Image (cartoon, helix red, strand yellow):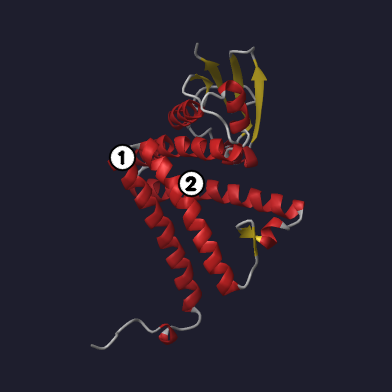
């Protein structure tokens, strides 16, 4: 029987890079479907456990394969060029990754909003945060090697490693051993709207999910209270503020 596999040589050279980007996108989407389905079938805790195992193995295999094709060295499982990159450049790259994450969030929001309206976009956005916040907390806990009972000090550390922390200005006001207030002093999204003389984006519904789920995923004893978040009125020095308490 004749092998009728697709012949890449028949593809125009300018289309091959497009195919690579398209295939990488498919990997990301397929990966997210796997995580979503394991979460649906087995629950979030099991899904995060499986994600950690699968990701570690997947990245190792992928980098080895790409390094052999693209001829770059690996050091401790990471591209050597990345490991040896000068501080200023690698920090700029971290910033670019964080900004791209925020842009992608906005692109998804607008794609839904322009077709289906603000209500559907906000509903999807809030539901997305209900899934992303626990995952981001999980990823940061692993990165920082935080214990499950790391308390408020652990949460303070974790808040400084969120994607938002790279691109926004935030601060912490201690209230004692049992609570602290987290302030978002400069929000990239809200500041852009302010420059355009637009009203604040009403993000409270998402924030109530985002911050509570994040804090609880860092340490289940932590309770979250919203001090203010748009459309709430707020002082000039912050756009939103949240109080975190350690439950006895």
Residue 240 x/y as whole percent: 56, 26
On the question of residue 200 being in view, the answer is: yes
What secondary structure is found at the residue carrying circle 1?
A: helix
Q: Residue at x 66, y 17 (%)?
A: 174
| Side (left or right) of 92 relative to 29 | right
On residue 169, the disc is none
Q: Quadrant of the N terminus?
A: bottom left
Residue at left offset 54%, top offset 68%: 66
Residue 3, percent from left and from top: 29, 85
The answer to whether the residues at label 2 and label 1 have Cβ atoms under 8 Å apart is: no
- Closer to the camera, 152 or 232? 152
Q: Is residue 109 left or right of residue 115?
A: right
- Disc 2 or 1, which lies upstream in sequence? 1
Q: Nearer the viewer, residue 1 or 204?
A: 1
Crowdedness of circle 1 by 10 Å Cα count: few (<14), some, many (20+)?
few
Q: For the residues marked 2 and 1, what is the alpha-carbon distance in whole angstroms?
A: 27 Å
- Residue 47: image location, x then y, percent: 38, 42
* Residue bearing mark 2: 105
Residue 234 appears in the picture as rendered: no
User: Dot 1 corresponds to which residue?
Assistant: 42
Q: So how many labels did they put on this image? A: 2
Q: Nearer the viewer, residue 33 or 239?
A: 33
- Category of crowding for the residue at label 2, using alpha-carbon neighbours closer than 10 angstroms: few (below 14), some (14–19), many (at least 20): few
Whether 205 is drawn above or below 143: the answer is above
Q: Secondary structure at mark 2?
A: helix
């Amino acid at each position: 029987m004749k092998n009728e596999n697709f012949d890449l040589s028949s593809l125009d050279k300018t289309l091959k890079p497009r195919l690579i980007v398209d295939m990488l996108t498919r990997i990301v989407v397929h990966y997210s479907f796997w995580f979503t389905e394991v979460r649906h079938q087995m629950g979030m805790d099991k899904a995060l456990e499986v994600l950690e195992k699968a990701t570690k193995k997947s990245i190792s295999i992928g980098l080895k394969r790409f390094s052999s094709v693209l001829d770059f060295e690996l050091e401790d499982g990471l591209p050597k060029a990345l490991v040896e990159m000068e501080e200023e450049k690698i920090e700029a790259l971290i910033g670019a990754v964080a900004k791209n994450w925020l842009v992608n969030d906005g692109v998804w929001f607008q794609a839904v909003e322009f077709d289906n309206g603000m209500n559907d976009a906000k509903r999807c956005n809030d539901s997305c945060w209900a899934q992303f916040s626990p995952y981001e907390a999980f990823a940061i806990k692993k990165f920082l090697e935080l214990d499950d009972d790391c308390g408020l000090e652990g949460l303070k550390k974790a808040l400084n490693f969120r994607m938002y922390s790279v691109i926004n200005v935030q601060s912490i006001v201690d209230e004692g051993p049992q609570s602290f207030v987290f302030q978002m002093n400069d929000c990239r999204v809200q500041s852009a709207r302010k420059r355009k003389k637009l009203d604040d984006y009403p993000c409270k519904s998402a924030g109530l999910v985002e911050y509570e789920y994040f804090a609880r995923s860092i340490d289940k004893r932590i309770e979250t209270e919203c001090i203010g978040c748009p459309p709430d009125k707020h002082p000039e020095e912050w756009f939103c503020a949240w109080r975190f308490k350690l439950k006895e």
